[in-house]
Image (cartoon, rainbow, N blue to C red):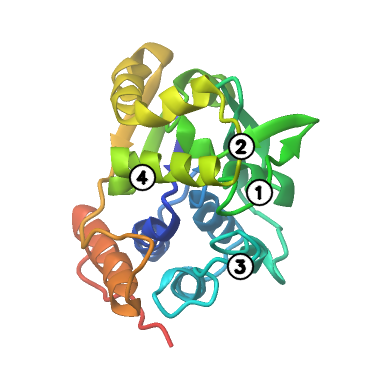
Amino acid sequence: MPRYLYIMGGGPRIAYSVGTVWAFEQIGIEFDGIFCVSAGTLVGMYYACKKSQVELLQLVIRTFSRQSPYILPSNGLLFDIKEFTRNMEIFPTTRVEVVSTILSGQSRLDPLSSQSLLATMAIPGVTCAKYPQIDGVDCIDGSINLFPTTIISGATGPAHITVLPNRSSLGLGSSAAELYWGLRAGLNLPPAIIMRALTRRRRFREAVKIAPSYDLEVEILWPEGPDLTFENTEQALYSAASQAAESTLRRFGHGNKPFPKTT
């Protein structure tokens, strides 16, 4: 049975996934493909392109630590998404598919590209000034639907899916924050988006529950470590990645190799 990795978002909370994926690299675990949501696409992109997860954590620290110049409002945005892709060459060696949400509330799946990256991370007023488009269709953050079972099963067939959630990205507070920034940006958010954002924790549980009926075996690797917000110390972000790496290595019986220090 093919194995796929499903990486959720959560802004700075991708530090957990950075640590977990780094541990996969140390163990030698490989996947037949990667599905990514929101900021989790950055982790999947670095992983598929065999770029350093330590370098990605440094980028996360520069972007989401309290001292970051990108976290302060500039041109109406909390940070510039272009900082994530600056000087990046996208040459994935593994299939990468990106989940975004159209304004009817349904998910769509697209190959990794700068366009799909912008769409899956689109929180108007935070990462973009207006809805980005794919094929002429307005899109918003892929985290509105955390695990679109039908779309995933249609892309994989029977498969084992390892899911990397990021704790508070499932919470009501995170959803409310996204809605707040969208409203602040002056957007008329469709009711379908509002309702899906506020009920995504429940819908995630339901999606995982019905996954076996779609021939999907779902394994969820919940992160260990401190919870993160949009204002973190450099040490908090590093600790999240480090503890996730250590717990993953222990889970798969590969000792306790420390996550490299960032510089």
Identity, as a three-letter code, of the amino acid under mark 4? Ser
Neighbour tally class for label 4: few under 14, some 14-19, many 20 plus, Cα within 10 Å: some
Disc on res. 118:
1
First in sequence, mark 2 or 1: give its number.
Answer: 1
Q: Residue at x 33, y 70 (%)?
A: 232
Q: Mark 4 — residue?
A: 174
Q: Position of residue 12 (x, y in %)?
A: 41, 61
Q: Residue 123 lies in what quarter of the image?
A: top right
Amino acid marked by disc 3? Ser
Q: Quadrant of residue 173?
A: top left
Query: Which tag is nearer the camera, tag 3 or tag 4?
Result: 3
Q: Which mark is residue 75?
A: none
Assign a secondary structure to mark 2. loop
Q: Earlier in the sequence, mark 2 or mark 3?
A: 3
Distance between the Cα atoms at labels 3 and 1?
A: 18 Å
> How far, Cα to Cα, is label 3 from label 4?
21 Å
Tell me the quarter of the image containing the N terminus: top left
**CA distance separating discs 1 and 4:** 19 Å
Q: Could you tell me how far apart the alpha carbons at marks 2 and 1 are, in whole angstroms? A: 17 Å
Residue linked to disc 2: 187
Q: Is 114 located above or below residue 83 in the figure?
A: above
Sequence order check, earlier mark of 2 and 4: 4
Q: Of the residues under marks 1 and 4, which one precedes in the sequence?
A: 1
Query: Of the residues shown, which amino acid type is indicated by label 2?
Result: Leu
Determine the residue positioned at 43% across, 80% down. Answer: 67
The residue carrying mark 3 is 74
Q: Residue at x 67, y 50 (%)?
A: 129
Location of the C terminus by quadrant is: bottom left
Is residue 33 visible to the viewer in this orientation of the structure? no
